[in-house]
Amino acid sequence: MKVLIIEDEEEMLQNMKQTLEKEDYLVETATDYDSAFLKIGVYEYDCILLDISLPGKNGLEILKELKKRRISDGVIIVSAKNSLDDKLEGLHLGADDYLPKPFHMAELNARIKAVFRRRNLKGNTFIQIENLKINIEDRIAFIEGEELLLNRKEFDILFYLTSNRNRLVNKTALAEHVWGDHIDQTDSFDFIYSQIKNLRKKLKDHQAQIEVKAIYGIGYKLVSL
Amino acid sequence: MKLLNYTTKYFAAILLFALLIFTVIFYFQMLDEIYDSLDDGLENQKILVINKAKKEPSILHKTSFEDGYYTIHPTSYSQIKEVKDSYRDTLMYMLNEKDYEPVRLLETAFRQDGKYYKLKVITSMVEEDDLIEDLFYSILWLYIGLVVGILLLNNWVLRRLWQPFYSVLTKLKNFNIEKEQGIDFENTNIEEFQLLNHQIKKLLQKSIDSYKAQKQFIENASHELQTPLAISLNKLELLAEKEELSPKNIELLASVLENLERMTRLNQALLLLSKIDNKQFVEEENLNITETIHQIVNDFLDFAKHRNIEISIVGKNLIQKHINKDLAIILFTNLIKNAIVHATLNSIVKISIEGEKINIENIAETGKLDEQQLFSRFYKVNTRKNSTGLGLAIAKAIAEKYDLKLTYAYQNKHIFTVSF
């Protein structure tokens, strides 16, 4: 998978690059309009991470140019502005998703994977990890071909963790993803724990070859046994 | 007291004083004039009587007034050598009034045919008490007339004169800095008012400018903080993924992450608040509020369950409102979340939808909250670690933007009401 990050903030760029390289993607970077199109003209990318506020011509200009050139790479806008207008215009100009800064790396990962799936895995909507198989479209999980009965939240958690397999998922990221952005100010995320506990039990009962590991204070990690 | 009535008050006091003095002087002058003319008349009558006595000596023995206006008593020279014309007031019984009334009396003496006579001439006189009474009433009426006149004149003239002033006053009363609109002043030819208008205009513009600048500053500041926050947060997440970290270090890292996230939330709340203030939510739709509340409650079920709190929604009344969807969700999310967070464990959070009102009630250990402070920024009842102290301020800002009434009441439980 090839990803292009267009971002003028050097450290932000390095963060995203490091994260994505852990997923074994081929990551290229650009810092402005011109350097971006030097790369876009040469390679085809599965996903472009695009910062809106760039020096000179901004990210929306890049989107317009992409549309003009009929380049249909998947685009995720990352923006610190979190402005509704930018979001609407970006999506209107053909972006696949909009991710406001600051974001959690786990969320970035999940969004990129969603873009890959929409673009590349046409018809193929299954994820296989060890003996766990997830049918994304029908939202059903199987272990050794046997259905794992999960409620909506448990499925969302499992699916999110599989998108970030072997990686530490921040509990805030998990809560925001599964329960929505507005959950973020609640006192603690202890309530996630009860859902995780149920999920763990179900995985264990079905002798899954994976487990949800708690990393004290920070979050969870889906690991192979 | 109004300016108009204030001047009238002073006028009334001054007039009262001036009229009193005038009345006293006038009274004595008038009385003086009356005596003067009465005495002239008496002197004339004296001469007439003396002349008559020369022609008709019979009257020289008219010793009582009866039907006349004079008496003559024969007397000796020794008794009258001292007598000069003397005028005095005395009382006399008047048949018509059936009472003693004051009369003016002239006492004099004359000689006729070598004999001396004493002559008294009277004339009825002005009744002083009646005069005073009459005078008092006419002055009173004059006074009332003048005060009423001044009042009317003031109200007419001054009102016209001060009209630009009152117009500015009304406009200032209706001025709202949040609308960021200055005041259009009427043109006036009065120099003082021109100056006043000019100064007010300058002051208002300054206030509006600094209000705008302050809002803009908060937005810019929180916006600029986003990127460094994002970088730090992500770097720490990358660090946390490193295998070689000891559990102790992970714990440290978790604490830093947690605080950084708290800062991020605070920053985002501030940004949201200034975006609402800066009117950056333009998009509106006709939103089913009742349904929205049901959805929000649904999102919080897990959280409420964790605290063993039951959320009950009473009333199915359909409330619709033309509103920005995101803001509506934030408004009710903040209120409902607040209720759940602050409710005592194992209690019920009741949401009732009645008529055009939505009540959100929760029982809490804290007593009545300070209504004045409640909706202001960074107001915290207890120092809950994860509270930004901005939730209610945001809710209030949203409510105000859409002319909804967000109120708080305490009846052994906290009740927040949104009235549409």
Image: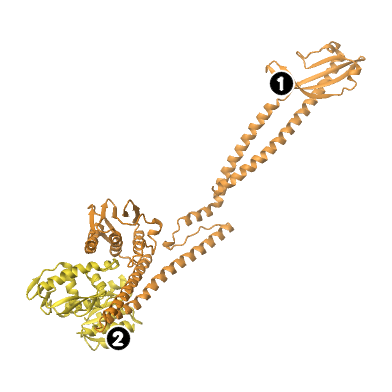
Front residue of this view, candidates A107 and B47: A107
Marked residue chain, label 2: A
Vertical order, B145 against B390 (above or below): above
Chain A shown in which color?
yellow
> Residue B68's image quarter?
top right
Taking B170 as reference, is A110 left or right? left
Residue at 32% x, 76% y is B256
Vertical order, B303 against B23 (above or below): below
In the rendered image, residues at marks 2 and 1 fall on the same chain: no
Q: Can residue A64 be seen in this view?
A: no
Q: Can residue B341 be seen in this view?
A: yes
Vertical order, B160 against A172 (above or below): above
Q: Where is residue B310 in the image (x, y as percent from the top left)?
A: 23, 57
Residue at 81% x, 18% y is B120
Say what amino acid the circle numbered 2 marks.
Answer: Ala
Q: Name the residue under label 1.
A: B101
Q: Mark 2 points at which residue?
A: A30
Image quarter in which the C terminus of chain B is found: bottom left
Taking A25 as reference, is A207 left or right? left
